[in-house]
Amino acid sequence: MKDINLIRQPIGLRFSSYFFLIFWCIVAAFPIFWITVISVKLPIDAFNSNPLNVIFGPVTLTQGKGLSFIDITVGLAIILFTAKLTTGWLGRRVNKYSPNGYLWFGWIIGSMAFGISFIVVFFAIMPSMLSVLNDYAGELGNNIIGFSTQHYSTVWFERDFINNFKNSLLVTTGVVTISLTFGTLAGYGLSRSGSNLAFWILIIALIFRALPHSVLVTGYLPFFINSAEILRPIFGDAAPTLYGMPWATIAVLVAINQPFTIWMLRSFFQSIPSELDEAARVDGCSHFQAFRRVIMPVMWPGVITTGLFSFLLAYNDFLVTSMLLEAQNTTMVPAIVSMFNMETTTTDQVVAVAAAVSIIAPLFFLVMFFQRQIVTGLTAGAVKG
Amino acid sequence: MNPKTFAAFVGPSIVMMVLFIALPLASVLKQSFYVTQPVYEILEVETCTPTFTGQLCVKEIKTIPTIGDNGKVITQTSFVGFVNYQNVLELPRVINAFANNSWQQFMAIDFWRALRFTLSFTFITLPLVLFFGLVIALCINNVAKSIRGPVIFISLLPMIITPVIGALAIRWLFIGDGILTSFLEWWLVRDIAMFGQAWTIELMMMFYRVWHVAPFAAIVFYAALQTVNQDTLESAVIDGASRWQKLRYVILPHLMPLIVFVTLIHLMDAYRVFEEVIGFSSQAHVISLQWLTYDFLTSDLMGNRSIGRASASSMLTMIGIMLLLIPVLRGVWIDYKDKRL
């Protein structure tokens, strides 16, 4: 690999590249870092005008809530170690132990087990061990940074956020499974057909991708609210009111996501040479068998990547879920919006911040696990499509 | 692949899209010409209040909504033509505002206010996203391989974060005496209220959007930078091209299809600006087209939703995005025809 670009790089240019990247990383991470810091402080510290007070939290500290030097070192070490494991070790384990052709399944099981064990170690085993350790460590065991998890327990247990979490889980699982099932079939069909019809379907899907979601919601809402009366002639008295039903929302989100899913999966399928299915066909497979036995086993990276983006769409959605679900059984994002709209005291504000951090924490781990898949996903749609 | 297998593979997805995208669109079009209103009846009500001298009775004629057998208000739907559109566009007020030569009056009308913000938001963020995306990509390409991974990891964070929460995170930096507001106040030695006027809020919204989308552009461009033809670059150097000329004549043309791609995606997404309005609670100062429809759809205190008006504003929003996309889609079409020939 000769990289003349790199060799002839003047010092000044390299230096400014590093400088700019450091600046960018600070800009990119700072808002997220800051709300995380605020969420573990008591309100007086959290909204202090002196940034150092916000970071170290003297008032939080005087109440006996804090982290010692040992806590911080051990915590950071565990996080770094986990990051190291996810990038290399986990992949190798999964590759080794997955049954042939079910690699994607191995990944799902592997990452779930890994995630759960991380949560157990980090939130259950580590704190209790550290509290013992801090007692023996003397000077190093004293708290130096204010840290309080009380707002998190308020959010999750008193405000019933756990209920919203379950709804989010239900909606995202539904959206990911259904849109992948429909999407892989369509993506494969479109990638293996050079007809004009296929081209037009893709263009129409692209136009659908451009539709603002509020337009579609306007179409659903009157029907969903009155569906019991409209559907009565067909279903009789069992006709459901679709408004407020999680599965109706799942269907809507799947449909909204479908154009994007098709495009992305099609470009992944196109990167698989069609000689592969021709070979399978020569060996006597039908199109569907070739798809299932030959193509799908090599397709799993594409499926996982597309699944990730479907997950993000469903998880991050505010407009559709807030319009089509009732306030009691809504998902996490609409719940937090109503939470911070009615916030009155500063404690309520910090509670809302803690809820926000709770929502983005899984996304943080998602990027850690699947960084490579996300990057290929972003570029696959672009480079080949 | 014969048509039958093709239909079997693509069918379910098409049915899904027809059922949940095309049909709702048709119904929005229909709804935009109808108005659903409660049926009112005119009643003469006599209310009497006892006074010292006897009863004082007042007869009043009231219009109250008719209650049906099931305890709900009876509604009726009637065809009204373009009335909903007129209610959204408010053309007489527009003409009036132009006659008075008053931009302020024009901006007092919700639809035009929303349109103005949506369009300026889209077209101001677009070049910024492309520029910062390109600069970040070039910088990542310039530094040692070992630190590229962590930099990409950090860059992905703003992109995948829930939009509402991303907007909230930026808002919490500025709200009240938030850290950045105090910093600005200390620096400029003056009082600053970031949420007091429209333009500062718009500035924060645009900052948020660039922060949120630039990583996407950067990663797409960075991936394409890996496939720049090294031979072309080498011969450019031999021919004495400067660094700037290499960028201008070799690298940018190579990135061109991706610049078009990012532009297309960004036009679609920025035109839908909505989460920012929610996250910054800016509805008093700044609203967007999607938010306008959302607001029409939200039920008011009486439990009524102005579906007709929401449909009209939806249709107008949709016409807007079509107009924006036509130039780009035409390019795709010409490209496709060239490939076939």
Image: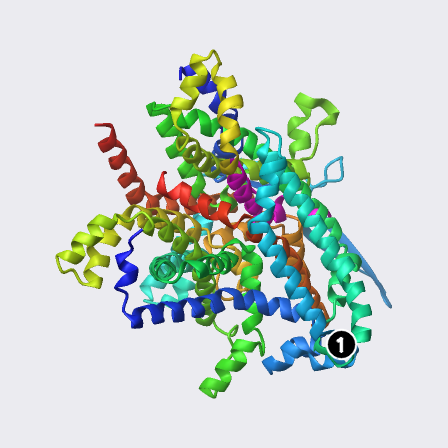
Quarter holding the C terminus of chain B is top left
Whether residue B81 is situated above or below residue B273 in the rendered picture: above
Find numbered disc 1 in the image and state the secondary structure of the residue it sits on.
helix
The amino acid type found where label 1 is placed reads Gly
Farthest-out residue, top = A284
Please name the residue that numbered disc 1 is placed on.
Answer: A141
Whether residue B302 is situated above or below residue B102 in the rendered picture: above
- Horizontally, is B155 left or right of B227 in the view? right
Residue B106: image x %, image y %? 39, 62
Residue B27: image x %, image y %? 51, 34
Q: Is residue A59 in the magenta section?
A: no
Quarter holding the N terminus of chain B is top left
Which residue is rendered at x = 41% and y = 45% of the image? A379
Farthest-out residue, left = B239
Q: Which quadrant of the view contains residue A342? A: bottom right
Whether residue B276 is situated above or below residue A301 in the rendered picture: below
Q: Which residues are magenta?
A: A303-330
